[in-house]
Amino acid sequence: MSVAPSRTAPRPAAPLSGVRIIDFGQYIAGPGAAMVLAELGASVTKIEPLAGDQARHIGRYGESMVRAYNRGKRSIALDLKSEAGREVAWRLIAGSDVVIQNLRPGVMDKLGLGAAEVRQRHPRVIYLSISGFPSAGPSRDRPGYDIAAQAESGLMSVTGEPDRLPQKVGVPIIDAAAAHVGAQAVLAALYGRERTGQGETLETSLLETALHLQAATWCEYLGGGPEPTRIGDGQPHNAPAADVVPTRDGHIVLSAYAQEHWQRFCRVMGREELASDPRFATNASRVAHRAELRAVLKECLSGYSTEECVALLGRNQIVTGAVRRYRDVLASADLQASGMLVEAVAADGGGYRALGLPYRLGDAPQPALAAAPECGADGAALLAEAGYSEQDIAALRQDGVIA
């Protein structure tokens, strides 16, 4: 006889409760991967240089990076060029399950804290490195930022208007995606360790992540398709598909290239004759007459407001979306209902709003992580937990080993 679970039963612990992460990362990719794991319940220690994560020194956007990708962590600032500083790092690593780093190529190896050294001493540790370029390739020693990966993966060559310069995506999307790719790899390795008892050396790069995000376009090209080019809005082989259409007070993006959807669009607009117009009767003909098609779309929709378009087309199962500014997105009922907006509370009672995980685990609320720590804010506590006495900590501070 089975017994129904109690509605008042306590929630299970977070999935990664008890997992300990050491984060040597800076900027976005490494810290972002560690924070994903923190949001899943892991305990994350951020090891920073004495001057702090470089993102702390590049102005307002850098401070936003720190806030966005370091919630829920504790920070210790160490001089890793000193023997005493490296000894502190080794003690912290010894008590960890995962090490994450995205420093310049070769830096961790020069410090004696690379993957080979760490895993030789601690075979159960999972070591994730995120670099700009693949470690086996000729560009492995080049510094790599998001923008370099966008350029060298082909992404910029297909982004923008055909008669203008290639364009980057408006946000550092490759850095952010690499953070999730890295976290995914760590989760797989943690699962594997449960079966084998052994850790793993994990590598990914911004270039590989950027390529992977373009998998469908690359698959077409590898199968003999033409060289992809920039066409601005719209898609090269379907129409209307991702076309930007002006409304009375803004813009929408519209996709109705499946024949059933196009015919439905024509009926909803009261323009049934368009469905049999030789220029628009098939997807191929609409692609061939894209300029005329866009003129017709504008004619059909420019008299409606953006919200009227979204409501009308949406209730008729035609894919559309309003092109919104950030302030419009923030006010939208969908964002509010998602639960992604979280409050990061600082130790002094202050705090800020941020975006949490883009998925949910059952009906559990979004994790309430603390605000990103100040550089070195938790150094003394972390050292005490690692077995250092008050006298030891004072000496390390006096010698400039910790901030």
Image (cartoon, grey):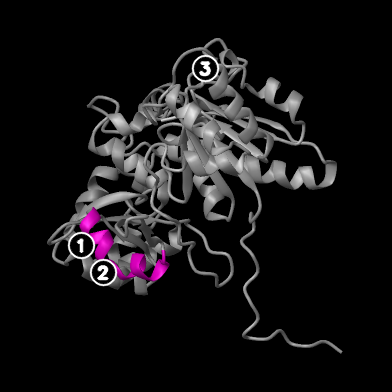
Residue 345's image quarter?
bottom left
Q: Is 43 situated left or right of 258 in this image?
A: right
Mark 3 lies on residue: 82
Q: Nearer the viewer, mark 3 or mark 1?
A: 3
**On screen, residue 186 above or below 224:** below
Q: Could you tell me which quadrant the N terminus lies in? A: bottom right
Using the image, determine if residue 72 lies above or below residue 396. below
Give the SS element for disc 1: helix
Magenta extent:
326-339
Q: Is residue 44 left or right of residue 319?
A: right
Quadrant where the C terminus lies? top left
- In which quadrant of the rendered view does residue 205 lie? top right
296 and 30: which one is in front? Answer: 30
Q: Residue at x 51, y 44 (%)?
A: 381
Magenta span: chief secondary structure: helix
Q: Disc 2 designates what residue?
A: 269
Q: Residue at x 59, y 70 (%)?
A: 362
| Dot 2 and dot 1 residues touching (CB under 8 Å) | yes
Q: Amino acid at mark 3?
A: Ser
